[in-house]
Image (cartoon, grey):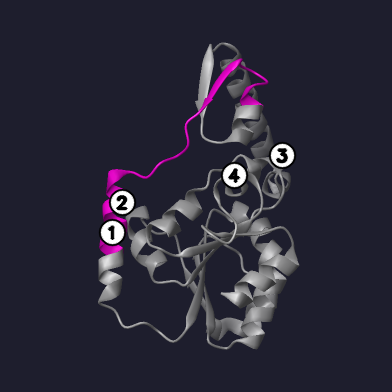
Amino acid sequence: MHPYIKAISPKEKKLYNDGVNLIGRTLKLCDGAITTTEALARELNKYVTNVFINRNVVSDEMWKLSQKALIDKENKTKSKDIVIGYFSGSISHNPDFELVENSLIKILKKFKYVKILLVGNLKLPESFNEFSEQIIKQEFIDWKLLPDIISNIDINIAPLLNIIFNEAKSENKWVEASLVKIQTVASNYGAFKQVIQQNKTGFLCSNEKDWYFYLKLL
């Protein structure tokens, strides 16, 4: 179970469990199902026999916005700072971020020109307080603004805690960064493990040592 689910109130947990049970009952009435990742397919197979994987793809609009972001980037003066971007979305990503906490702190201490851009509802650990001048925070934004923002970072990170909730997630973070030619360092897990070719289309990390190595290298 995801740490976020464990932390919610008994009332919220009951609503969550009721929803999960209703989805399970609905699936048992179906002849087939379509999903986006191998992990989700395995779970769906517990309820329905015929399961097909249709991976998430880029919309025409996302492609056009990404191409525009690349053109706009060419007309901007490159900053001397190196920006590591983390696009967290909801607060459920707090446990994921803890995977890279120590590595990022080491990087921030050693390289004062490195900054971290945090986009979304993330509660930053107190251990980052001393690096406030190297932290850039931004709240939720319209997805149409993402290509421009991602194109102006240097490294996109996508840490994932090793739990079934995360294994079922798609590789969207890697796709969005790839569209604007930004490299991704991700957990060697789930969909990232399936689609990223190590040291060619991205960098996969299995432990803290890997995270520090690739972030320092890049």
Q: Is residue 32 above or below residue 177?
A: above
Q: In the shown orientation, is residue 179 left or right of residue 131?
A: left
Query: Is residue 184 in sight in this rendering?
Result: yes
Which residue sits at x=61%, y=52%?
92
**Spatial distance from mark 2 to mark 3, Cα to Cα?**
42 Å
Which residue sits at x=62%, y=69%?
124
Disc 4 designates what residue? 194
Which residue sits at x=41%, y=65%?
150
Mark 2 packing: few (<14 Cα in 10 Å), some, or many (20+)?
Answer: some
Q: Is residue 55 magenta?
A: yes
Image quadrant for the N terminus? top right
Task: State the residue in front, 10 or 211.
Answer: 211
Q: Amino acid at mark 3?
A: Pro
Residue 63, numbered label: 2
Task: State the residue in front, 111 or 138.
Answer: 111
Which residue sits at x=62%, y=48%?
193
Q: Is residue 35 magenta?
A: no
